[in-house]
Amino acid sequence: MFTRWSFSYVILSTVGILVIFFCTMKYNEALRADLEYTNSVQLELVQVQMDRNVRNLRSFASKANLNKMVDSLRELDSYEEVSRYDLYVLMKELAGEMLWESGSQDTFLYFPAMDLLLSGSYYNNSRDYYDIAFASYGFSYEDWYEVICQDYRAAQIFALDTKRGTPLFVLIKPLDSSSRQTPAVNAIMILDMEEILRASQWLSQDRDNICMVDKTNKRVVSHKALEPEIRELLLESGADIEGSRRFEAGDSVVSLVSSLYENWDYGVITQEQATAARIGELQSLVIFLILIYLVISAGTIGYASFRHYLPIQKVIRILQQQEERDEGHMVDGDAYEYISKSVHKLVDQNKEHTSIISRQRSAIGRELLHRLLTEKQAPDLIDEGLLKQYGIHVGDCLCGIISYRMTEILPGESGDTQEMSWFILQNVTEENLLQVGFEVLCFREGRQEQIFLFWREQEEGMEEGAMCALRTSMEFVESHFKIPFGAALSDLHQGTEEIYMAYREVCRVFEYKKKEEGKNIVSYGEINLLPVDTLLKYPIDVENRLTHWVSTGSGEAACREVRELLESNQANCLEPEAMQFLVSNIGASVIRAAGGASKGTSLSVSQKALMEACRSGDTGRMQEELERLVITTCREMEELRKQERDNHKGKLYLDIRAFVEENYSDGELSVNSIADHFGVLPTYLSKVFKEMSGDKLSQYIHMVRLVHVKEMLFEDVRLEDIAQECGFGSQRTFLRIFKQYEGVTPTQYKELEEKKRKEEQGL
């Protein structure tokens, strides 16, 4: 009857739950379809825009490969031997090939063999181009040069991080992709993904991410940082992709499509936040409705069974099962009488099992403690509730380890005597630790070691209390027993996960052979040893980074590298001698990075101060002097770089003056023509000349020409001929400039000078 009555409720509940789940599934499918359509549109837009750029890059590389001037430049080691006019013509040709519809790219040719960069409006070395075009983005020149200078034989993609938080994509197409040993020439395109995102009405700059997968070189570059899981999925999925593909990773939807021109994939990564929120709300509502439905049904069934049927049935069933196991048959008679007899019998059996359960709990507790001490990952594998159930409830309290170890076995001593000694030692130690407020657990490790774990919530005076309890226990045992014991005390540690570290410390105390003679109690804090599993850590990559920061004059970054290196080694309890050796090695690396600047007086003083700090053995002072040496070295390197820049500007200034003196008669002489001759921008040329002389370059050209004009005025040469000979082009321009600078006409100037000369002769 009970089964038939409850079965109807089960049928109704099942039908209701199925209906709710069916409706939910259909709604979720509609939301997913909407999201997939949006992703497909986004992916098509990205493919069209990116393939357009890749097609333009390939076209540019193909045309440049067929250019005879490019082919001749590949065989040269320096572009100084090339005519500036030829380079100018080649630039004009490249400019015509780069008139594309999109403004999101910057394209040029680069010759690694002679560090020559050619674009539609510029040619020079890569460093000058970086200073003009890319220094404001925030990535370093070294990173930029490392990408463009390689001899590539296949198309490449890279990303350069900028200070605004989003990278620039670098697409490289070598002109010659064969395996022939020909000088490399790279066609390079710089893409700004921010412009592509801003141009799209479907893509969001905050929510969406664009990436490219290089299937040939197993490389992924993206507009935003990628999670490692998504990066691995992109590399795995990109190997066999055909057409477009879509998959999910966490809260993101990744859509991929192959490039039409290269062995690349384009990807759009969309966060499903809006859709996931709607689906999550729907799921929460469904779960809530199901729970209410189940609670009502279960409450109706449970109330009837609880009040009328289940209590007696449950008791009878348990007692019948027990009776069948013990005697193999049922006892007939009144149910209540049967229950009474069975309960009395179970009480008697429970008394017999109590002592067995207690011993089993104790054994399990010792085994759990043994695992915490001997297995480093045990706190992550053992549940905290299980530890508390068996008496190990350290939690976040400070804890420590006391270990007794028998140093030798005396002849004639029986096993019972040794066992008695361990028993008394355990009880005495536990009593003394309990008196100072500790909670204690003890277990044996083999036949020769006994270990105590102690902890308490009150942290004040824990170390002194543990040492006092240990000393009292040892004195009592040594006065009554002759078995030789040694005792070790670890440092205090925080939480259950550090119990393993405390046990390792007491083990090291017993392994340490330089303790004082006759001293049976040794604390880990009293010894000075280099752990056997600790090595001096100065990795080559850290040394390379430190050398790079010092050579570039980045003092703050170099000091940060030094501090992190010292902290990682100090955490391993290095001896002072080892720390001195490490600091000396770091100092040597800094001096080597300084190169020629290391002969300065300030560097010599800082180096001597560091050597004195190493001899003193003071770790804090060694770190302070080392950072001072790094700062001084970086300052010297920065000064050296500044001098080199100033020397370059000074030479350029003198060359400009000489060029103007030599070519003043050329009517085409101007700031732009001089800039073309020296291969720099006119603005940069004017800035250098203004900075070095205080005058504008155009004014200086006029002044040089006027000096020669004044000499020719007294040679009876016609004004028209003077204008042509001195580079003014026309007589009208000549008269205007002469009047502007001298305040009079050439004829008036000549008359005034002749009159002045006559007066001087008359005197």
Image (cartoon, rainbow, N blue to C red):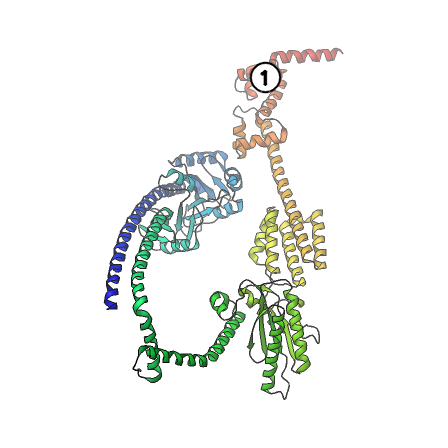
Residue farthest toward the right in the current orientation of the protein: 763
Secondary element type, mark 1: helix
For the C terminus, the quadrant is top right
Q: Position of residue 311 (x, y in %)?
A: 33, 70
Residue farthest toward the bottom in the current orientation of the protein: 412
Among the 4 quarters of the image, the one containing residue 686 = top right
| Residue located at (61% from left, 32% from top) | 653
Q: Position of residue 448 (x, y in %)?
A: 59, 79
Task: Examine the rendering and report whether any part of residue 648 can be seen.
Answer: yes
8 or 146, nearer to the observer: 8
Residue 69 versus residue 158 in the image, above or below: above
Among the 4 quarters of the image, the one containing residue 612 = bottom right
413 or 44, nearer to the observer: 413
For the N terminus, the quadrant is bottom left
Q: Position of residue 195 (x, y in %)?
A: 41, 39
78 or 446, nearer to the observer: 446
Q: Position of residue 267 (x, y in %)?
A: 37, 48
Residue 469 versus residue 17 in the image, above or below: below
Numbered marks: total = 1
671 or 495, nearer to the observer: 495
Residue linked to disc 1: 740
> What type is the residue that disc 1 sits on?
Gln
